[in-house]
Image (spheres, rainbow, N blue to C red):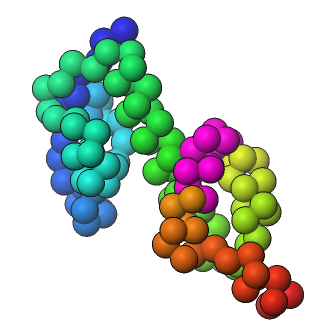
């Protein structure tokens, strides 16, 4: 099934993010860098592979946002956070991508977490 990106508008709630519209309906909000790296532009007709790619990006971003909100409450070990994100319904591959992103950003450190408890 082909879908069309009908809009890529700045997200007023999040600097550096764009709201993606598919077939005239709001779909997700993604970092500008992710949109650019994937080569998505307004007017693109997306085949099934490109729709899956956009879905994956949206799932990964949703898992990462949930991860950030979860870390606002307290620290977590990586395995514990993995279980929490999967329990919340995020796909496992999106959870792994979110955890990798958080590790690269220095947001997770099992050794430091263990030393605090």
Q: Residue at x 57, y 68 (%)?
A: 103
Give the image location of residue 45, x and y in percent.
21, 19
Question: Does residue 69 appear anywhere in the picture?
Answer: no
Q: Is residue 98 above or below residue 55?
A: below
Question: Does residue 70 appear anywhere in the picture?
Answer: yes
Q: Is residue 95 above or below residue 49?
A: below
Front residue of 77/88: it is: 77
Give the image location of residue 108, x and y in percent.
63, 74
Q: Is residue 16 above or below residue 44?
A: below
In this image, 107 relative to 115: left or right?
left
Give the image location of residue 32, x and y in percent.
24, 53
Q: Residue at x 69, y 53 (%)?
A: 85
In this image, 49 relative to 81: left or right?
left
**Secondary structure character of the magenta stretch overall:** helix
Q: Is residue 93 magenta?
A: yes
Q: Residue furthest left?
A: 43
Q: Is residue 1 above or below residue 107?
A: above
Front residue of 10/44: it is: 44
Q: Is residue 34 magenta?
A: no
Q: Quadrant of residue 117?
A: bottom right
Q: Residue furthest top?
A: 1
Q: How many numbered callouts?
A: 0
Give the image location of residue 40, x and y in percent.
22, 35
Q: Quadrant of residue 42?
A: top left
Q: Quadrant of residue 112?
A: bottom right
Q: Residue at x 50, y 47 (%)?
A: 60
> Which span is picked out in magenta?
89-99
Q: Residue furthest right?
A: 117
Quadrant where the image shows the N terminus: top left
């Amino acid at each position: 099934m082909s879908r069309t990106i009908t809009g890529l508008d700045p997200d007023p709630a999040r600097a550096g993010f764009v709201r993606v519209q598919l077939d005239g309906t709001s779909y997700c909000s993604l970092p500008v860098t992710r949109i650019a790296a994937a080569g998505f532009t307004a007017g693109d007709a997306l085949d099934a592979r490109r729709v899956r790619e956009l879905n994956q990006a949206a799932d990964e971003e949703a898992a990462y946002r949930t991860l950030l909100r979860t870390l606002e409450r307290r620290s977590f070990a990586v395995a514990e956070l993995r279980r929490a994100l999967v329990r919340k319904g995020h796909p496992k591959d999106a959870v792994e991508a979110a955890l990798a992103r958080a590790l690269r950003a220095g947001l997770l450190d099992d050794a430091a977490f263990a030393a605090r408890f």
